[in-house]
Image (tube, rainbow, N blue to C red):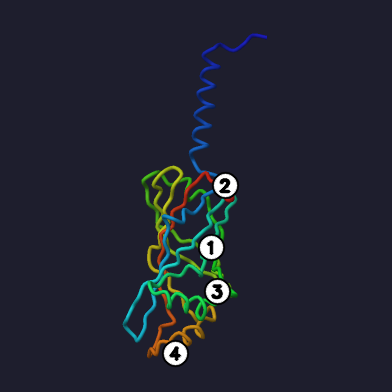
Amino acid sequence: MKRPPFYILAGLAVVLAAAYYFYSHSIPAFWTLNAAESSLSFTSVKNGNIEEVHTITGLSGGADFMGEYSITMDLRTVETNFDIRNERMREFFFETDTWALATISGPFEPRVFENLPVGATLRTRISGTLSLHGIEQPIAVDVVMTRTAWDRVTVSSFLPVIIDAADYSLEGGIETLRGLVGLDSISPITNVSFELVLEGGVTPGS
């Protein structure tokens, strides 16, 4: 049997190499949260007009190529800049002895990342379920995605996400905190903001 000319074989090799490069550099199989470079903050308002900003530093999770994302927040890592307040938030508000973790999870469309060129920004809405204090509620978040590299994406809240403590049976904890420090009021409404850095090509658990 006559063999194909060398230039055909060489051309086929180039095509295959290019296809492999495009495939391997288009979208990684997993997007894993870089906790060290990610942040999540929430506000509290006491006595009507005194607003303070707190953070949750224990973040983990990511998204997979099968179309699911999940972000876990370790509520034991709440940081309010005061040790005694950190302890009270854990014990009386979040009740971390029973509910140490909060999660948000839901469907994820991989093409959102795949079709976003490096350097480009996209505003979109992500839906899911927030599990907090033993209660699950649907949630929708407007985010801004920026693909800073082929294997790196930043997902930030476009506007603060409004959370009502009553939706998660947290109002009792608020009342306990209010009484402990002798405040007139603590608002049950909090605004949550975040910036999540996701890195591709890393298999969770590896």
| Local SS, label 2 | loop
Residue 174, above or below 196: below
| Residue sticking out furthest to the top | 2
Q: Earlier in the sequence, mark 1 or mark 4?
A: 1
| Residue sticking out furthest to the left | 49
Q: Earlier in the sequence, mark 3 or mark 1?
A: 1
Q: Position of residue 154 (x, y in %)?
A: 41, 53
Q: Identity of the amino acid at label 2?
A: Thr
- Closer to the camera: disc 1 or disc 4? 4
Front residue of 185 and 29: 185
Front residue of 98 and 121: 98
Q: Identity of the amino acid at label 3?
A: Thr
Q: Earlier in the sequence, mark 4 or mark 3?
A: 3
Q: Position of residue 100 (x, y in %)?
A: 56, 70
* Picture quarter with the N terminus: top right
What residue did someone put label 1 on?
Answer: 72
Q: Answer with left or right where residue 134 lies relative to residue 196.
A: right
Q: Which mark is residue 179?
A: 4
CB atoms of marks 2 and 3 within 8 Å: no
